[in-house]
Every structure is written in C-alpha cells, then in structure tokens.
Image (tube, rainbow, N blue to C red):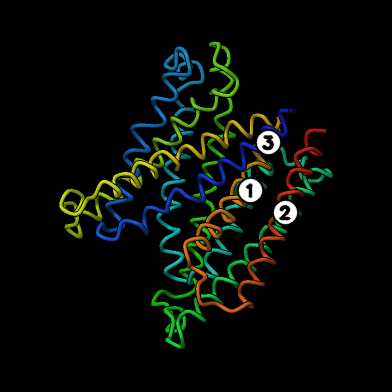
Amino acid sequence: MSAFVVGIILVIVAGVLEGLFSMGVTRTPKWKFENIWGIGSLIALVLVPWPLALLTVPELGSVYSEVGSKLVCITVLCGVGWGLGGIFWGKAIAAVGMALGVSLLMGFINVFGSVGPMAIMEPAKLSTRGGMTLMGAVAIMIVGVIIISMAGKLKEKEQSEGEASSEASGPSTPFMVGLLFCVLSGVLSALVNFGFIYGAPVGEAAAKTGTSPWATGFAIWALVFTGNYAVNFIYALILMIKNKTAGLILSEGKPIYWFWALFMGIAWPGGIAVYGIAANKMGAYGAYAAFPMMLLVSILTGNAAGALTGEWKGTSQKPRTWMIGGVVILGLAFVVLGLANKLLAN
C-alpha cells in the first residue's frame, strides 16, 4: 500500500475523530457546557500532547533548543489563535445563525487554512495546475457546505412545527458584527494548520534525533495543543466561576459523563495528531490538501452521527434530498483534493 493511500486512510480517521469529539456536549445534560468543555480541554492538554511527545521524541528539549525560542513561541501562539477561533465560532453562530454561520465559517477556515498558507509560503504554486485544482476543490467544498447548511435549516424549520425559530426572531447582534466574528473565527481557527506548516523545522529537528517519521509531528503538536487547550480550559474556567457551575462537576457527574469527557479529551487532539501523520504521508504538499480533507470528513461524520441519533426524525424528503446532494458534492471535493495533492507533488 502506497504512502499516499495510507495518508488518505489516516485523514479519514482524523476527520471521524474531529467530527465526533464534541458528542459529549449533548450527552451530559446535567452538566453545563463549561463543565464538559473545561474537563475535556484539561484532559486534552495534560494527557495527550506532552506524553506523546516525550515518549516518541528523544531529546525533546534539545529539539526545541535547536529551532530557537522564536519559532517555538510562534508555534504556541498559532495554538492560542486556534483556541480563540473556537470561542469566536460560538459567537458567530449566535450572531448570524447556524445555517449561514457554518457556511461562512467553514468557507473561511478552508480558504485561510489551506490556500492561505500556500499563498504566503509558496505563492507561485497557486498558478500551477495543482494550485488551481486545490482552489477549485476548496470552492466545491464550500458549495457542499452551503447546501448541507440549507438542508439543516429546512430540517429545523420542519421540526419547529410552525414555531418561530431563533433565527426568525432576529439575532440581537448586528449582522456586520456577526460577519466580523465569522472572519475572526475563520482566520484564527485556520492557525492550527499554520502552526503545523510553520512549525515544520521542529519536526525536521526531531527527525535528526532518530524520531520515527510518523511521530515527528508530535513535537509540533505539543506546542500547538498547549496554546489551544489552555485557552479553552481558561475560558471554561472563567464561565464556571461567573455562572457558579463548577460544583456541578462533582454533584451531578456520573460515570458516563466522565467517559464522554475522556473521549472528548482524547479524540479532539487525537484527530489532529493523526491528521499530522496523514499530511506527512501524503508528501511535501500534504498539509495543504489534507487539512480541508479532514474538515470535509468531520462535517460528514457529524451529520451522519446526527442522522443515526434521530436528529432528522420527522422531516420530509426535501431536506433529506438537499443533505444527500451536499454529501455528494463534498465527496467530489474530497476526490479533487486528492488530485490536487498529486498535481502539487509533481
């Protein structure tokens, strides 16, 4: 089996993990959002990145010393930006609504996280067949996301049984402010891929110490994850203090709640770590194509999980047809992204 095929399989695994990691938010009803999010973020910060890096990268300290404090700090700051992007994501959805919000956000993240790094680091590549194919794939993916969002809006409308939806009543935040939140979230969330691409010298230094090729990315992710999950944990902690909900962790916590927190804490960073391995397997330009591929699979996984858990119950054929159409278009985008990676490598 070729390295490229292995990379495709791994990017699918990464997308599935990213599409499922937040399931615990809806399955811990007696906890508030900040409880499950805070615990999951803490687990993701403490149990995954640094143990992985320390166990797989010999002389990790010397790796960071070799690349210099500036590169280390910038890589961590990319993680901080990624964490802030998640916070603005919630604000954007609240301001412009789920249907439009998801479409705008996924579009911005794809553009800034895939085409953006190439425009900055290798702008000449954008005018090649591979670069143009990559941009075309991202455009196809955005169309698919818009169609899936429309299907979701139709589903919500039918399930509301004539009741005024929150979007119909009009968001309290002005649309232009909501649009600004979308742009900020898209730019900041895309920094996770900037961190991986910009932090490549860290992986190269790790390789010199005898680190296995599949594990060199862990030295990068330890830095990026620290920035992201620290921001998310601090944000959740602030909410727990403000809302006086910290006590619910022990008073309402059930074993199944702790399972979902553990699942979130492992699947969230685990998916990104697997994505890093996939991008390396897919070649020198793997990160540019694998990133939107992972997002695409995460969208499909999230929607499939929703369908299997009854979220589409009571809907007519129309929204389901829209959803199937969107899925088909996303599948086409996945194929075109793979072609783009091949063309870029050649």
Residue drawn at (37%, 59%) of the image? 26
Q: Where 295 sits versus 90, above or below?
A: above
Specify the quadrant that holds the C terminus.
Answer: top right
Residue 165 located left or right of residue 240: right
Q: Position of residue 245 (x, y in %)?
A: 19, 56
- Is there a contact, CB below 8 Å, between mark 2 and mark 3? no
* Image quadrant in which you'd find residue 243: bottom left
- Rounded to the nearest angstrom, the CA distance separating label 2 from label 3 is 15 Å
The mark nearer the N terminus, 1 or 3, is 3
- Rounded to the nearest angstrom, the CA distance separating label 1 from label 3 is 11 Å
Q: What element carries label 1?
A: helix
Does residue 95 appear anywhere in the picture?
yes
Residue drawn at (27%, 58%) of the image? 32
Q: Residues within 10 Å of mark 3 (few under 14, many from 20)?
A: many
Q: Residue furthest bottom?
A: 162
* Image quadrant in which you'd find residue 327: bottom right
Q: What residue type is labelled 1?
A: Pro
Q: Where is residue 135 in the image (x, y as percent from the top left)?
A: 74, 51
Q: Where is residue 242 in the image (x, y as percent from the top left)?
A: 20, 58
- Is there a contact, CB below 8 Å, between mark 1 and mark 3? no
Q: Residue 333 carries which label?
A: 2
Residue drawn at (66%, 34%) of the image? 7
Residue drawn at (51%, 51%) of the image? 19
Q: How crowded is mark 2: few (under 14 residues within 10 Å), some or many (20 or more)?
A: many
Specify the quadrant that holds the N terminus.
Answer: top right
Q: What residue type is labelled 3?
A: Gly
Q: Which mark is residue 292?
A: 1
Which residue, given by chain and number where applicable, does mark 3 sit on? Answer: 286
